[in-house]
Image (cartoon, helix red, strand yellow):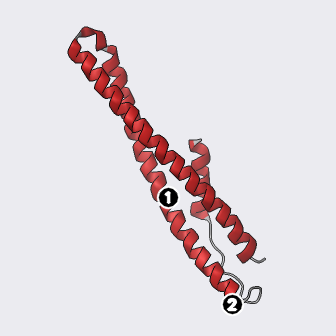
């Protein structure tokens, strides 16, 4: 899932929106295409920012998971260790939930963006 998303984002990052040909489109269509093109570029930037946020969260989840595994190994030595294991597990679970929400949000954004790019290419890019 992460590789698919990363490759989708790479494709979006390299997308060069063509300027609509004035001879192929009416003035109203050119204005619509220009507005859509600006919107797509802004949403591409938003997707890139969300992807970077997701990557940062992924690193935090991995660190929290390692901390929980370490604390879990010491759980049976004392009540303090058991408490620490419970706390690190709760932190890990919380971060996993945040990562899942961020991932879903990013996937939805990229999906809508890809659909809109297809619409833009169909309406505005003439060969």
Q: Looking at the image, is mark 1 or mark 2 earlier in the sequence?
A: 2
Residue 83 in the image, given as x and y percentages of width and height: 25, 20
Q: In this rendering, would 109 be left or right of 76?
A: right
Residue drawn at x 44%, y 52% is 52
Q: Is residue 1 visible?
A: yes
> Quick check: 36 above or below 47?
below
Residue 51 in the image, given as x and y percentages of width and height: 48, 52
> Quick check: 93 above or below 105?
above
Residue corresponding to mark 2: 27
Which quadrant: the C terminus? bottom right
Residue drawn at x 39%, y 38% is 95
Residue 26 sits in quarter: bottom right
Residue corresponding to mark 1: 48
Q: In this rendering, would 75 be left or right of 98?
A: left
Residue drawn at x 63%, y 73% is 17
> Quick check: 30 above or below 101?
below
Residue 84 sits in quarter: top left
Q: Is residue 9 visible?
A: no
């Amino acid at each position: 899932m992460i590789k698919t998303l990363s490759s989708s984002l790479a494709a979006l990052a390299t997308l060069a929106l063509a300027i609509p040909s004035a001879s192929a489109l009416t003035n109203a269509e050119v204005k619509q295409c220009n507005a859509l093109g600006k919107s797509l570029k802004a949403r591409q930037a938003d997707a890139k920012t969300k992807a970077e946020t997701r990557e940062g969260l992924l690193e935090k989840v991995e660190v929290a998971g390692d901390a929980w595994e370490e604390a879990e190994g010491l759980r049976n030595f004392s009540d303090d260790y058991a408490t620490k294991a419970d706390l690190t597990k709760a932190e890990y679970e919380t971060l996993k939930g945040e990562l899942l929400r961020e991932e879903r949000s990013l996937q939805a954004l990229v999906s809508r963006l890809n659909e809109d790019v297809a619409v833009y290419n169909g309406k505005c890019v003439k060969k």
